[in-house]
């Protein structure tokens, strides 16, 4: 299974391997990570595996905080 992982800075091969291992947990298949860089994320990563998206970016966390403060 392929996963697209986008980060704010380039990932080292070791970081990409650890992310692949975490994404493979609970699945009965190997996950191959394709990396991309998007400086707009500010930090963290966004991983897409099939139709699932795991958003651990600083940008999304700041957006959540802003929404919570407006309520």
Image (spheres, grey):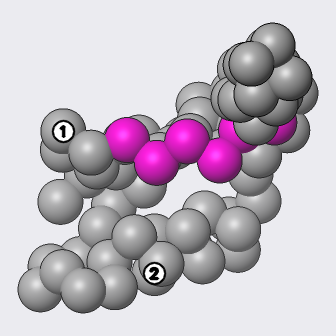
Depicted 35 relative to depicted 32: above or below = above
At which x and y percent is residue 22? Answer: 48, 78
* Most foreground residue, 68 or 48: 68
**Quadrant of res 28:** bottom left
The verdict on residue 45 being magenta is: no
Which residue shows up at 45% across the image and 81% down it? 21
Span highlighted in magenta in the image: 53-59
Where is the C terminus found, in terms of image quarters? top right
What whole-number distance in Å separates the C-alpha atoms at marks 1 and 2? Answer: 18 Å
Residue beneath disc 1: 51
One can see residue 21 in this view: yes
Q: Is residue 16 left or right of residue 20?
A: right
* Residue 9 in view (yes/no): no
Category of crowding for the residue at label 1, using alpha-carbon neighbours closer than 10 angstroms: few (below 14), some (14–19), many (at least 20): few
Q: What secondary structure is marked by label 2?
A: helix
Residue at numbered disc 2: 21
**Disc 1, disc 2: CB below 8 Å?**
no
Which residue is depicted at the point 42% across and 55% down?
Answer: 33
Q: Quadrant of residue 53?
A: top left
């Amino acid at each position: 299974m392929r996963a697209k992982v986008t980060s704010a800075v380039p990932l080292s091969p070791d970081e990409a391997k650890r992310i692949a291992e975490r994404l493979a947990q609970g699945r009965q298949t190997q996950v191959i990570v394709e990396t991309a860089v998007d400086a707009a994320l500010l930090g963290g990563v966004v991983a897409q595996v099939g139709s699932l998206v795991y958003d651990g970016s600083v940008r999304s966390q700041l957006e959540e905080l802003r929404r919570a403060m407006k309520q």
